[in-house]
């Protein structure tokens, strides 16, 4: 049965289980046996007799040749004869695979050639044209044809077309149709791909240095690879890639277009000019690779990657998305400017933070990450070597015994100098002082009995504030007429230790960037300051009571003049004290000086230092105007998606600021206590950060607090539900009720 060739181009599709049939143009045809032939100058150089016999095949085309080209045209004609062919009008249908190799004088192929198989054109340095209306049912491969400037606009390739190392080729015709993949590589003159080229599967443009533009609205059904094409500075709008997109090693593309669509993987590894995505949100349904993008500064505010997110060695990347979800592994190794991870995130696989030297704290979600979901028995690795996380925290993580998670802290980590203090709720002072009395300078971290929480600051702030509260209730102080706290005039050995204990707690608080509130009056810090200047005259290794007992009258009166100068400011008062017995005078001066001296001794033992009175008070108590400081410290982060979904999210920061302005002292303390672990703030730049999330599954939970990072999450789904009874009331309850889930302290 003769083979039918139609004008309409439709790549042939062999039918399953029927290799002797062809489905073509909507009809079924029986296939003839396929042959192959090579048109090479070496094969036919000594077969001139056979060439003469085949002159009739393409006689007009052969006669049109000039000079030495005639010989190569005859060789081509003989190869067609060997392959088998039939003529239909002006078309020649070649029944098999045809290789045209090494015909150095051949300047063109005949027009109207249809190859019912694969075509290779290799090392034909003078070839200018592959002929008009060239069609192949299989693939076409053209290489090392240095004079070939263009392909015909009528060219149709059934499967894949590869064109490589054709130095003069500068035009791809708009009518070109390729049934599967179009591969263009090492074409030094090629500048663009026009609109109107049909590509059935993949497009690869590799090492084409002059290539500078792709058509707008380009659609590639499967993969798009742009490698070594540094003339491209931007991608066109409307580009759609059905499966994988790669611009690996690009030196010129700075950003992706806003409307790019990629069906699966995005590979921008070592794209050294790439700066960012220009997208508010991005969903990658496969893997996202931005490793080595040394100029990348930003990521979308909402980023979801279904598989691995690889971002190692992004040297300028400093901020990660607020909404962050990675289905596979997360690699941020050697991202040296990242100071913090998102407060909320989901990661399905391993996490590599190796070399993130600015990273100081780890969020609650990472500390409690658990094993790899859906992979029972697979150990999840969290790599933390070379981060800025303190050795104390790393050692806590190293000591965790979890069967499904391993925190890799690195082999060269120095030995920890910190001691773990295991506390029980309500007995924090007892457990902390048990360590500090023997080792007042010892670095410590807090661990609550029965809890796996890691102390990155939040637990310490909570525990030391609780200890402060517990000691404040002991009989060290009494209210005066104006209700301020003063010392109880009771001096014995037990009180001396109690004052030192209290001062050691205060010294540690002064170093924790926290505030305990304004319970202690200004007079307390005046007396502490005097004690800090006088304690240097006493032996720190001996009891203060014993040393005071050994003082003579002159020394005692000197102390009296220092601690209570108003008692000697008239001659009558001086005469009165001179008449007192040594025992009575000593007791009176004990009552005035023992507490400030004991406080000073404990404060210095635990690392406190003498500063201006107001500075010391602020380090311990926090700012005098907590409301002003809280408003200055407030950060509210609302994603664009949440603003679109919830109308009240647009004004959330303004609404929270307004509530803080009108909050009572107790409400402010409750807010700070939830967010930081202590009722006030301290530090040059304190932080109170609020993030939004949307979880309809837990609408009964309105807020979650993270005291280590001083942040709070507000569930907009819960707030939307509660606003039916009054939005402002619901928001006020969320901030000041003290009922947030306390995640890490």
Image (cartoon, grey):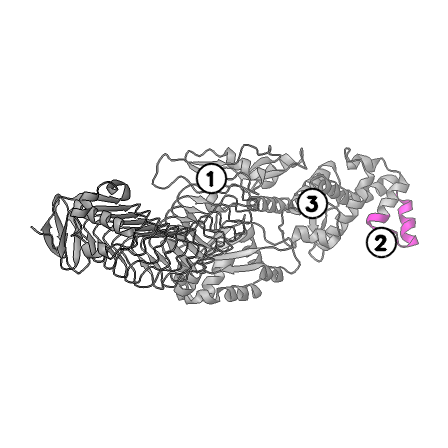
Name the secondary structure under disc 3.
loop
Q: Give the residue pinned by disc 1.
A: 382
Against 491, is 198 above or below?
Answer: below
Image location of residue 167, percent across then percent down: 39, 53
Q: Position of residue 541 (x, y in %)?
A: 77, 33
The x, y position of residue 233, in whole percent, is 46, 59
Residue 10 visible in rendering: no
Q: Residues within 10 Å of mark 1 (few under 14, many from 20)?
A: many
Does the residue at mark 2 contact the one at mark 3 (Cβ under 8 Å)?
no
Determine contact: label 1, label 2, CB under 8 Å: no
Residue at x 75% of width, y 43% of height: 600
Q: Secondary structure at mark 2?
A: helix
Q: Earlier in the sequence, mark 1 or mark 2?
A: 1
Residue situated in front as seen by the camera: 278 or 509: 278
Q: Residue at x 45, y 42 (%)?
A: 351
Tell me, for residue 476, which label it has, or none.
3
Disc 3/disc 1 C-alpha distance (Å): 48 Å
Circle number at residue 566: 2
Q: Gap in Å between the C-alphas at discs 1 and 2?
A: 64 Å
Left of 410 or right of it: where is 213? left
Which numbered disc, 2 or 3, marks the residue that appears first in the sequence? Answer: 3
The magenta stretch spans which residues? 561-580
Q: Is residue 728 visible?
A: yes
Sequence order check: which comes first, mark 3 or mark 1?
1
Camera-near label (1 vs 2) is 1
Q: 659 or 457, which is in the foreground? A: 457
Q: Nearer the viewer, residue 407 or 124?
A: 124
């Amino acid at each position: 049965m003769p083979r039918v060739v139609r004008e309409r181009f439709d790549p042939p599709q062999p039918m399953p289980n029927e290799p002797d049939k062809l489905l073509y143009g909507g009809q079924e045809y029986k296939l003839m046996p396929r042959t192959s032939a090579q048109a090479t100058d070496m094969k036919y150089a000594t077969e001139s007799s056979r060439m003469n016999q085949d002159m009739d095949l393409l006689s007009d085309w052969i006669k049109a040749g000039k000079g030495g080209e005639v010989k190569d045209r005859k060789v081509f004609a003989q190869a067609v004869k060997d392959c088998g062919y039939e003529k239909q009008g002006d078309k020649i249908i070649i029944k098999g695979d045809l290789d045209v190799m090494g015909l150095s004088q051949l300047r063109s192929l005949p027009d109207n050639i249809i190859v019912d198989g694969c075509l290779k054109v290799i090392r034909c340095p003078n070839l200018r044209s592959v002929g008009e209306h060239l069609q192949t049912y299989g693939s076409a491969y053209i290489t090392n044809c240095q004079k070939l400037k263009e392909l015909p606009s009528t060219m149709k390739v059934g499967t894949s077309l590869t064109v490589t190392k054709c130095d003069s080729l500068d035009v791809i015709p708009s009518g070109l149709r390729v049934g599967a993949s179009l591969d263009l590589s090492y074409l030094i003159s090629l500048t663009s791909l026009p609109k109107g080229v049909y590509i059935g599967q993949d497009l690869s443009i590799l090492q084409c240095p002059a290539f500078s533009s792709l058509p707008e609205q380009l659609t590639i059904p499967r993969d798009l690879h742009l490698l070594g094409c540094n003339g491209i500075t931007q991608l066109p709008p409307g580009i759609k890639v059905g499966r994988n997109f790669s611009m690996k090693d690009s030196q010129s593309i700075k950003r992706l277009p806003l409307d790019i669509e990629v069906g699966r993987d995005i590979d921008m590894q070592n794209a050294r000019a790439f700066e960012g995505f220009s997208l508010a949100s991005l969903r990658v349904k496969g893997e996202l690779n931005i490793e080595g993008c040394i100029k990348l500064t930003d990521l979308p505010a909402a980023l979801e990657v279904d598989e691995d997110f690889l971002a190692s060695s992004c040297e300028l990347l400093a901020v990660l998305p607020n909404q962050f979800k990675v289905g596979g592994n997360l690699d941020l190794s050697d991202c040296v400017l990242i100071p913090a991870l998102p407060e909320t995130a989901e990661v399905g696989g391993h996490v590599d933070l190796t070399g993130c030297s600015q990273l100081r704290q780890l969020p609650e979600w990472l500390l409690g990450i658990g094993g790899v979901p859906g992979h029972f028995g697979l150990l999840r690795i969290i790599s933390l070597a070379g981060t800025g996380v303190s050795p104390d925290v790393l050692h806590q993580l190293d000591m965790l015994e979890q069967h499904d998670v391993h925190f890799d802290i690195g082999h060269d980590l120095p030995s920890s100098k910190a001691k773990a203090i295991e506390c029980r709720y309500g007995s924090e002072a007892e457990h902390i002082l048990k360590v500090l009395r023997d080792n007042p300078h010892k670095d410590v971290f807090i661990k609550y009995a029965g809890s796996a929480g890691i102390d990155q600051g939040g637990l310490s702030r909570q525990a030391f504030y609780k200890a402060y509260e517990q000691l404040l209730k002991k009989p060290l102080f009494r209210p005066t007429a104006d209700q301020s706290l003063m010392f109880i005039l009771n001096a014995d050995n037990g009180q001396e230790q109690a004052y030192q204990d209290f001062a050691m707690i205060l010294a540690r608080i002064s170093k924790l960037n926290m505030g305990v509130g304004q319970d202690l009056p200004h007079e307390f810090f005046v007396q502490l300051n005097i004690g800090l200047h006088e304690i240097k005259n006493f032996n720190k290794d001996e009891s203060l009571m014993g040393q005071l007992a050994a003082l003579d009258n002159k020394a005692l009166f000197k102390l009296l003049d220092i601690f209570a100068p108003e008692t000697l400011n008239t001659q009558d008062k001086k005469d009165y004290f001179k008449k007192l017995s040594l025992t009575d005078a000593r007791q009176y001066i004990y009552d005035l000086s023992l507490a400030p001296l004991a406080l000073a001794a404990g404060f210095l033992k635990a690392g406190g230092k003498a500063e201006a009175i107001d500075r010391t008070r602020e380090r311990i108590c926090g700012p005098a105007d907590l409301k002003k400081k809280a408003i200055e410290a407030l950060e509210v982060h609302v994603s664009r998606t949440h603003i679109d979904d919830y109308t009240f999210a647009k004004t959330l920061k303004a609404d929270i600021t307004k509530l803080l302005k009108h909050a009572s002292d107790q409400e402010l303390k409750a807010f700070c206590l939830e967010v930081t672990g202590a009722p006030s703030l301290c530090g040059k730049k304190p932080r109170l950060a609020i993030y939004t999330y949307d979880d309809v599954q837990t609408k009964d939970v309105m807020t979650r607090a993270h005291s280590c990072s001083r942040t709070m999450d507000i569930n907009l789904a819960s707030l939307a539900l509660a606003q039916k009874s009054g939005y402002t009331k619901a928001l006020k309850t969320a901030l000041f009720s003290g009922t947030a889930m306390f995640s890490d302290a």
